[in-house]
Image (cartoon, grey):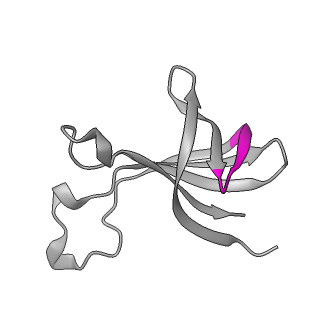
């Protein structure tokens, strides 16, 4: 099966002391995370042109590759935003299904 790209915001329930994803909702269906296969951080600039690469424009994302109880594998990320004074910028996204 070819990877399927989503790129949409999702609602995530977190658990644990480190606050990792425990479940998420997609299209009215809830997926329970069975296993976190891999986790990493992204502090890059994305596709910004070289002249626009300023520290305040960097991504601050935590990525997770997860396996659900249905044995589906998804890549989701938590966008931590760029401004601590605006928690509304902190959102979860479903990147793709593998």
Residue 52's place in the image compared with 15, above or below, is below
The residue under the point 51% across, 20% down is 17
Q: Position of residue 41 (x, y in %)?
A: 45, 48
The residue under the point 62% across, 71% down is 5
Q: Residue furthest front?
A: 28
Toward which corner of the image does residue 20 lie, by quadrant?
top right
Toward which corner of the image does residue 27 lie, by quadrant?
bottom right
Residue 81's place in the image compared with 45, above or below, is above
Residue 80 shown left or right of residue 93 in the figure: left
Q: Which residues are magenta?
A: 26-36
Residue 44 shown left or right of residue 41 in the figure: left
Q: Position of residue 47 (x, y in %)?
A: 34, 75
The residue under the point 52% across, 62% down is 8
Q: How many marks?
A: 0
Residue 66's place in the image compared with 75, above or below, is above
Q: Main secondary structure of the magenta part?
A: strand
Quadrant holding the N terminus = bottom right
Residue 31 shown left or right of residue 61 in the figure: right
Q: Position of residue 57 (x, y in %)?
A: 21, 60
Quadrant holding the C terminus = bottom right
Q: Residue furthest top?
A: 17
Toward which corner of the image does residue 87 lie, by quadrant?
top left
Is 32 included in the stretch rendered in magenta? Answer: yes
Is 91 included in the stretch rendered in magenta? Answer: no
Residue 77 shown left or right of residue 44 in the figure: right
């Amino acid at each position: 099966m070819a990877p399927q790209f989503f790129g949409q915001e999702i609602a995530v329930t977190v658990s644990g002391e480190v606050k990792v994803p425990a479940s998420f909702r997609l299209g009215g269906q809830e997926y329970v995370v069975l296993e976190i296969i891999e986790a990493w951080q992204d502090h890059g600039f994305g596709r910004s042109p070289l002249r626009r690469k300023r520290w305040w424009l960097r991504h601050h994302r935590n990525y997770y590759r997860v396996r659900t109880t249905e044995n589906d594998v998804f890549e989701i990320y938590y966008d931590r935003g760029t401004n601590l004074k605006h928690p509304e910028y902190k959102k979860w996204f479903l990147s793709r299904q593998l």
